[in-house]
Amino acid sequence: MKNKKIILGITGSIAAYKCCELIRRLKDKGAEVFCVLTPNAEKFITLLTLATLTEKRVYTDLPRKEILRDEVKTGEIEHIDLARIADLILVVPASANTINKLSWGIADNLLTSVILATDAPVLIAPAMNSAMYNNPLTQESIARLKQIRGFHFLGPVKGMLACGDGDIGRLIEIDKIVEKTFTIIEKKEKSKLKGKKVLITAGPTREDIDPIRFISNASSGKMGYYLAQEISQRGGKVILVSGPTQTPVPEKIKTFFVNSAEEMYQKVKFIFTSLDIFISAAAVSDYRPGKKLSKKIKKEIKNLNLTLVRNPDILLEMGKKKGVITPKILIGFALGDKNSLEEARKKLKEKNLDLLVLNPPEVMSKEETQAYFLYPDKKIVSYPKIYKRELAVKITDEIEKLV
Ligand SMILES: Cc1cc2nc3c(=O)[nH]c(=O)nc-3n(C[C@H](O)[C@H](O)[C@H](O)COP(=O)(O)O)c2cc1C
């Protein structure tokens, strides 16, 4: 973990003192540790202890309250700087309050702001009274953070709690946290995607009818954006070409926004030859109006006939160039269920794909999905119920095998 920058978020839990051992262990492995405390954490552990152990300035709430040691580059926007320098963010111990806030994107102190702004992997070790942990709201927050943001969770475990209960809620052993930290960083360090140029298309396309009307679909772009996030976290150089969406684009990802299928095609063609991997996750409209009217269609027209013409099949066109001109790895998506498997298999072959992910149409814009992975050797793997964030990890793991 030499020179790896680890942000250690500490919250208002009685287990905060255990951080001292964690800092020592991480530093023994060569990591640099930057402590960020919630205002409540300051009541449980002293800044002096943390600054001495980390040999660094300790970061407290917004606006900056106390500086014990001047360290690292800091600009005016502290939470963004910290979010950017992090190789990994740990929240140890994580209180119920902070977990619940994080799951709703609340950024009301330095730690929650850093986590909302980061693209780095986040590992959370909760510690709390068992009733707080078992509360359905806390459970829902943990599930949301895992599914929507791909956060890692460790523990809590059963054992004697400060409140006198002997149930679940105790902070997991520091050894396990160090081990998991190491595994996450190693996954990133050893990833074969490091430095690979990856183009991902995402979202719907919009085919204009007149200056204000268009044909489109319900794609939210989430699948492509989650893939961009995951691949970038493993060190890939990701470029996103996205249709118009309401979904926020992940931090640090170079993104080009396009409107129509034709625009998307032109952009992809332009970037294609310099790529290692192409992932087509966009829901490209198959058809567009034959001509775009320059003036708004008047409602006085009683019956309106719209002639639609075929749009370019971007993936098919790119599939023809695969291997001749880079990239060598092509991944595609198709809409359908188990009745469409045969058709999907044809598509995989026709488009020269290494992996085709088949999703049912009703999952468009949802977080949860169902998926079949189809491979050229006719193998099929089914995921009956999976969150798109988790699916992005599985797809990226498959890509790692192909590189
Ligand atoms: C002595 C004491 C111990 C506490 N221990 C915990 C704990 O282990 N876990 C937890 O979730 N909350 C614990 N709390 C409650 C939190 O400190 C409280 O919810 C606070 O708002 C958390 O703020 P933060 O998440 O911004 O740090 C404790 C409170 C006190 C007074």
Image: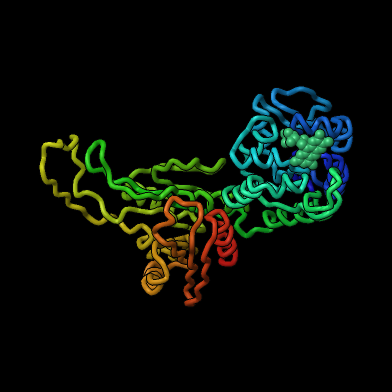
Residue 49 location in percent, x, y? 89, 34
- Which of these two is toward me, 361 or 110? 361
The residue at 11%/40% (across/down) is: 301
The residue at 64%/38% (across/down) is: 101
Q: Residue furthest bottom?
A: 378
Marker count (numbered): 0
The residue at 33%/59% (across/down) is: 313
In this rendering, the answer to whether 132 lies above or below 73 is below
Ligand 1 is in which quadrant of the figure?
top right
Please indicate whether residue 104 sits to the left or right of residue 330 in the image.
right
Residue 121 location in percent, x, y? 66, 48
Please indicate whether residue 378 sits to the left or right of residue 52 in the image.
left
Q: Quadrant of the C terminus?
A: bottom right
Coloring basis for residues? rainbow
Please indicate whether residue 143 sits to the left or right of residue 319 in the image.
right
- Which of these two is toward me, 308 or 143? 143
In this rendering, the answer to whether 55 lies above or below 363 is above
Indicate the quadrant where residue 320 lies. Answer: bottom left
Indicate the quadrant where residue 45 lies. Answer: top right
- Which of these two is toward me, 64 or 313? 64
Please indicate whether residue 53 sits to the left or right of residue 337 in the image.
right
Q: Does the rendering let one see residue 227? A: yes
Residue 299 location in percent, x, y? 15, 37
The residue at 65%/30% (across/down) is: 108
Residue 280 location in percent, x, y? 43, 57
Q: Does the rendering let one see residue 8? A: no
In this rendering, the answer to whether 107 lies above or below 29 is above
